Image (cartoon, grey):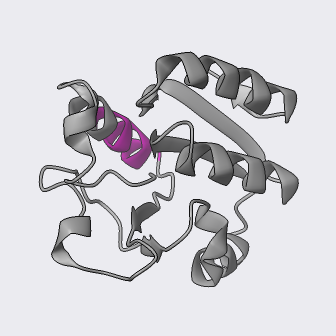
Amino acid sequence: MIDIQEKYLPYYDADFLTRINARISAAQKDNEPIFYFRNIGIQGDNDSYALASDLLIVSEHIYEKRFPSAFTNDSFVKELTNLNVTELEIIGVDGNSCVKKTCLDAANAGYKVTLNPNYTAARNEKIFEKTLTELSDANVTLISH
């Protein structure tokens, strides 16, 4: 779950958070580990970087990052190893930046990576179409269900 934060939600369609919460509920029912990331910016944390107030939080796996890829957080990478995670579904915002970079880094690290565009938002849809092709070419599985 990449950067579902209060400050970013106004850029995306009104039901995006509802779809995200539905996906979280489904993953929870399937006993899938759920990891949350919030971008804290280069300067570090402040209140403007809070997770979305209505985001369904069902796990203690909440991480921060200063750079686009979730794989820049060593604690997250270690936790994936500890939990023997081999497959990742990556969703969130923005599809052309943080989600894209996390998908590429996950694929390069040997994970089986899935991205569902129904749960991924991008501020520039034209660029996102090219991003999806790039991700597919990098062996990221694109699904929609």
Q: How many marks?
A: 0
Residue located 29% across and 29% down the image = 19
Return the residue found at the far left.
53
Task: Give, as a single range, the part of the protein colored magenta.
Answer: 22-30
81 vs 17, left or right, is: right
Res 144 visible? no
Give x and y (percent) for residue 124. Answer: 46, 25
Res 134 visible? yes
**88 to 17, vertically: above or below:** below
Relative to the observer, which residue lies in front, 77 or 66? 66
59 vs 49, left or right, is: right
Q: Is residue 113 magenta?
A: no
Residue located 67% across and 28% down the image = 131
20 vs 139, left or right, is: left
Relative to the observer, which residue lies in front, 19 or 66? 66
* Image quarter of residue 109: bottom right
Residue located 26% across and 67% down the image = 49
Q: Is residue 24 magenta?
A: yes
Give x and y (percent) for residue 10. Answer: 19, 38
The kind of secondary structure the magenta stretch mainly shows is helix
Residue located 62% across and 61% down the image = 69
* Image quarter of residue 13: top left
**87 to 140, vertically: above or below:** below
Give x and y (percent) for residue 86. Answer: 76, 55
Give x and y (percent) for residue 71. Answer: 66, 67
121 vs 130, left or right, is: left
Relative to the observer, which residue lies in front, 22 or 90? 90
